[in-house]
Amino acid sequence: MAGSGPSDFLREIGTDDMRGAFLESWISFVSGHFRKDHVILADGSGLPGGIHAPYT
C-alpha cells in the first residue's frame, strides 16, 4: 500500500462489491461490540465514493 489511510486500504481490497462487503461486515462488527446507548459517527468523505457511499 502506498499510504496508511482508510481510502488506501479500501482501494487495495479490490472491487466495489468487495469494498461494500467489507464495510457491511465492519459496521456489523463495530455495532455489535459497543454499548447500544453510544452512537458511532463515521466520516466517509475521505473514502472512495466519498459522500456517495451507502453508509454516509
Image (spheres, helix red, strand yellow):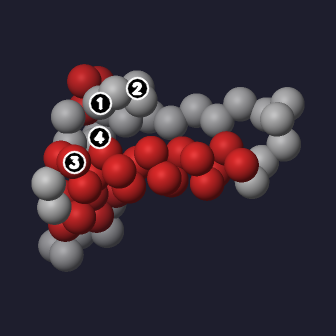
For the C terminus, give its image quadrant.
top left
Instruction: Residue type at mark 3: give it.
Output: Asp
Residue to which mark 4 is pinned: 46
Kindly report the distance in space between the C-alpha atoms of the residues bearing marks 3 and 2.
Answer: 17 Å
User: Are dots 3 and 2 in contact, CB under 8 Å?
Assistant: no
User: Are dots 3 and 4 in contact, CB under 8 Å?
Assistant: no
Numbered badge on residue 17: 3
Front disc: 3 or 2: 3
Q: How many numbered callouts?
A: 4
Kindly report the distance in space between the C-alpha atoms of the residues bearing marks 4 and 1.
Answer: 11 Å
Which is more N-terminal, label 3 or label 1? 3
Residue 46: percent from left, percent from top: 29, 40
Q: Is residue 43 above or below residue 56?
A: below
Instruction: Residue type at mark 1: give it.
Output: Ala
For the residue carrying disc 4, how many other residues have a C-alpha within 10 Å: few (<14), some (14-19), or many (20+)?
few
Instruction: Residue type at mark 4: give it.
Output: Gly
Numbered badge on residue 56: 2
Say what secondary structure mark 2 lies in: loop
Which is more N-terminal, label 4 or label 3? 3
Residue to which mark 1 is pinned: 53
Residue at screen point 18% across, 47% down: 16
Front disc: 2 or 4: 2
Which is more N-terminal, label 4 or label 2? 4
Kindly report the distance in space between the C-alpha atoms of the residues bearing marks 2 and 4.
Answer: 11 Å
Say what secondary structure mark 4 lies in: loop
Instruction: Residue type at mark 2: give it.
Output: Thr
Residue 23 located left or right of residue 42: left
Residue at screen point 25% across, 55% down: 18
